[in-house]
Structures are given as structure tokens and as C-alpha cells.
Image: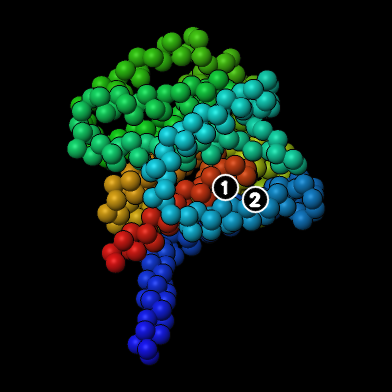
Amino acid sequence: MGVIRSQPARMTDWAAASVGAAWRSFDLQLATYAALLVSVGLVMAYTNSVEAGSTPLEAGTTFSRGLMWAGIAIVAFVITNVFDYRWLRTLAWPIYALQLGLLVLTLLIGSGVGGSARWIALGPLTFQFSELAKILMIIVLAQYLSSRVGELDRLRTILGACLLVGPPLVLVMLQPDLGTSLVFAAILAGMLFMSGASLKWLAALGAAAAATVPVAWTYVLRDYQKERLTSYLNPNPDLQGAGYQLYQSQIAVGSGGWIGKGLTNGTQAQGDFLPVQATDFVFSVLAEELGFIGAMVLFGLFVVLIWRILVAGWRSRDPFGTMFAAGVASMILFQLVVNVGMVIGIMPITGIPLPFVTHGGASLVSMAVGLGILQSINIRQTRAEW
């Protein structure tokens, strides 16, 4: 009888040991690098609140909203850690339908600047569902590609992935949001490339996409979007018109020097010369106040974060985990390159946020969800060994 009574205790001890060993696969480095980037974003939110003449902790300031969204992002990160990512493969099609539904809803009832429809009000908060749609798209593509591992060199597989990305990309373009639609295209390209898809067919796909540029220019892009692109190409842009943002941004970045002017001491931001300094052009504020060294520290954090994301993909024995990591890495890298490129003048202004740093709840929460799913992959991969 003694042996029988001890059996449940043994099972409990085994289960506890299994769970403990699985959670030892939690990637603390990945979580730490992401937390440091969020902290940089909060510092920038603080300085933007001060330069706006507000007490940072007042309700409604950039800093107080940033703290609130950071708290929500932490909750989202924890929930997705606990959630078994393998359910996402089963739910891929409902997730795809949810993504399309959210984007259609945004077009119907969304609000924005200049007649755009990008944000939906959720009580006192506003949320941009196109940011969440990026993560949902990565889930759907990861399931599609991982279920066709032996067919990735075939044209029909690549075209199938394009057909999946097409509808949400078009819906985002209709908002209109050129920057986010480009992120969808970058996710597709990055995941196909890192999955080992045929380079021949990828090159053909790129050529086909380039051929649609004249059509998009004539029938899709709005006038202000065309002005941004022509201003980028124009060696003598209109500094009082379409070229104003870039001109002020370059002054801010250049005046920061090696060590910067110090937090809350940026003359461009404090003097209200720099438009959208808390969102699209937050890197300009960082470069002015923290200088070249501060910018290099930021880039270093992004490099090690992307490295840990790729490590999670390489360690995964599940093709879904590998594909998902490739999608998240592609998304973050593309947004980093384009955002920084546009504020220093080597890329057109497209309104793409700087991950974790740009003030905006939808972007931060969506990034937290993506990294939480990666941690779930890390944890369940270890558990699968027993």
C-alpha cells in the first residue's frame, strides 16, 4: 500500500521537474534585449513629454501612455509564453479570417488623419489593427510554409504564399498605409528566402513586383505619398513643403555629435521644429540627445535581439518555429532599416515605426505577442524531448 500511495507523489515530482526543465529553456537574453529596447522607448517618451511642456506622469502625456502600453505589452508577452504555440498551427485559417476581418473593420469604422482609416477607438484607447495583422500574417505564413517543406522550390508554393499575403496587403494599402503594406511584402520576402525557396523564382517574383510600380504610382498612391517619394529623389526639395520633415530631421541627427546634447535638451525637438517626433521620427530625437554613441547602442541592441530570434528558429525542431522566427526577424530588420534610413535621408519617408521605440501601443503590443510566441516555441521544444 505504501508503494501505491507514493505513486501520485512521484508523478507530481516528475511533472514539476518537466515543467521546471522546460522553463529553463526560456530565453532570458531575448527577453532582456527586448526590455532594454522598450526602456529606450520609454526614455524617448519621457523626453518628448518634457519638451511638450507637460509633467511626464500627467494623464494623457506620451510618457504616461507609454507606461500604460508597456504594462499591457508585458501582460501580452506573459500570456503568449504560457499559451502552447502548437495550437496556432491548428488555428491558422481562423487566424487568417480574423486578420482580414480586423482590416475590413478598420476600413469601415476606422479614423485617421486626412481621411485615412487606420485606428479604431477602444474606449479611451486607439489601436491600429494593421500592426497586429503583421504578427497574424507571420503565423499564417509559417503554417503554410512549414506544411510544404519539401515543395519550397516550386513556383506554386511561392505563388500560394503571395496569394495569402495579397488580400491583407491590399486592405492596408486602402487605409491608406504604404509603410505597413511594405512590411507585409518584406515579411513575405524574408520568410520565403530564409525557408530556402528557389532564388530563381524569388528573382522572377521581384521583377514582377517591380513591373507593377507604374500602375501603383498612377492608380494607388495618394498625392502626399507621391510628394514624399519625389522629395526623396529631388536633390533640391521644397524645404517648406514635402522636404520639411527630412530637412529638420537631418539637422537634429547631425547636431547630436558624438555624445548628444543630453536628454530633454534637443533644440530641434524642444523648439517644435521636428514633426511627429514621438512616432515616425523618434530616432531623430534620440540621435540629437544621445548622439552617435547612443545610436550605436540602440543598433547593438537590435542586432543582439535579432540574433536571439534567429537562434530560437535554428534551435526549433518544428519547421513552424523556424519559419515564425524568420518572419519576426524579417519584420524587425526591415522596419529598423527603413525607419532609420528615412530619418537620415537615404530612404523615402513611408511612416514605418521604429520597433519598441516609436510611441504607439499597437506596435509595442504586437511585438510583445511575437516575442511571446517565440518564447513559447523555446519552452515547448524542450518539453517535446520527454
Q: Residue at x 75, y 54 (%)?
A: 56
Q: Position of residue 86 (x, y in %)?
A: 38, 50
Q: Residue type at mark 2: give it.
A: Trp
Rendering colour mode: rainbow
Q: Is residue 303 left or right of residue 106?
A: left
Q: Secondary structure at mark 1?
A: helix
Q: Residue at x 29, y 51 (%)?
A: 318
Instruction: Report which quarter residue 117 is drawn in.
Output: top right
Q: Which residue is mark 1?
A: 365
Closest to the observer: 88 or 40? Answer: 88
Q: Which mark is residue 69?
A: 2
Q: Residue at x 53, y 45 (%)?
A: 366
Vertical position of residue 79 compared to residue 219: above or below = below
Q: Position of residue 189 (x, y in %)?
A: 34, 33
Q: Position of residue 134 (x, y in %)?
A: 48, 37
Vertical position of residue 80 compared to residue 99: above or below = below
Q: Secondary structure at mark 2?
A: helix
Q: Earlier in the sequence, mark 1 or mark 2?
A: 2
Vertical position of residue 30 compared to residue 53: above or below = below
Closest to the observer: 298 or 151? Answer: 151
Q: Is residue 334 left or right of residue 115?
A: left
Q: Position of residue 179 (x, y in %)?
A: 51, 29
Whether residues under marks 1 and 2 lie with C-beta atoms below 8 angstroms apart, the answer is yes
Quadrant of the snapshot with the N terminus: bottom left
Q: Residue at x 79, y 50 (%)?
A: 59
Q: Is residue 80 left or right of residue 148?
A: right
Q: Tell me the distance, in whole angstroms, between the alpha carbons under discs 1 and 2.
A: 7 Å
